[in-house]
Amino acid sequence: PQLYGQAWGGNEPFSSAVYQVAWHAGSYTRTEREPLPKNINLFSFAKGNIKGDTTQQKIFITSQAMLQIQNADGTTAWTGADGYSGTGVFVDYPDEQFEVNPKNGALGRYYLPQRIHLQDVDGDGVNEVILADNVDRTGRVLPRTRMFKEGRVRCLSWSQLGLYEEWQTQPLSGHVSDTAIADLDNDGIKELIVSVIPPLSFSLSQPKSYIVMWKITKK
């Protein structure tokens, strides 16, 4: 596993370079710079082998919320046609094109993308791409607002034509806030763990969330 780090940046969040980070002399220090396209940040990429060869690819969620694969030489191998809505977690930052906040001035809002997992979950020796996909009622046209209808997790595999869907979970009302893959009960079979936030309620009750877990069976 490789640890990465990124400074906040200037006027925009996560606009600085991404670096590999290593533990050295009692602290974490940055080492090599990770070459990434513009607008790709620490939260919107994963690196690993999904083609079953000896090379490593980079998997991005672009600023247009499209899934994209980059070859080891920097060329684009594939770009998906469907958008992947992110999470409900956001970072506000100064931006004059957005509404003015009386306390903080003009604020833009950046919603964090979903976590991308690269794991061989079916036992064929090749990593799959696993990530959540939430349905945003606004269609991502409102830069400061997300209204999720439902979410699910998709598992994608590589073919010569690009990524295709192996399976998806059932729809979950609300939205998927995060995902993890681990063998929680030590039985040798990995589980998909999904954190779900139900639809927003206008009652006086406290917001709630819940965890769903599925066994990932091999072929």
Image (spheres, rainbow, N blue to C red):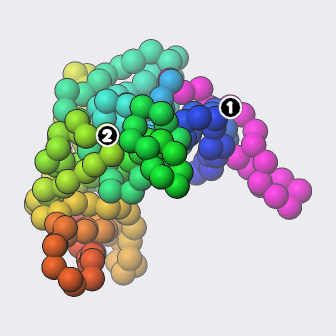
Q: Where is mark 1, residue-wise?
A: 33
Placement of 138 over or under 78, stated as above or below: below
The stretch drawn in magenta includes residue 47: no
Q: In this view, does 138 lie to the left or right of 122?
A: left
Q: Where is mark 2, residue-wise?
A: 143
The residue shown at (39%, 41%) is 99
Of helix, strand and loop, which mostly describes the magenta segment?
Answer: strand
Q: Is residue 2 visible?
A: yes
Q: In this view, does 203 lie to the left or right of 8?
A: left
Q: As shown in the figure, which amino acid type bears the numbered disc 1?
A: Arg
Q: Residue 17 carries which label?
A: none
Q: Is residue 63 left or right of residue 206?
A: right
Q: Is residue 117 left or right of residue 141?
A: right
The stretch drawn in magenta includes residue 28: yes
Q: Work out how far the residue at label 2 is from the one at label 1, CA to CA, in angstroms.
A: 30 Å
Query: Could you tell me which secondary element the residue under label 2 belongs to?
Result: loop
Q: Looking at the figure, which quarter contains the C terminus?
A: bottom left
Q: In which quarter of the image is residue 148?
A: bottom left
The residue shown at (26%, 60%) is 176
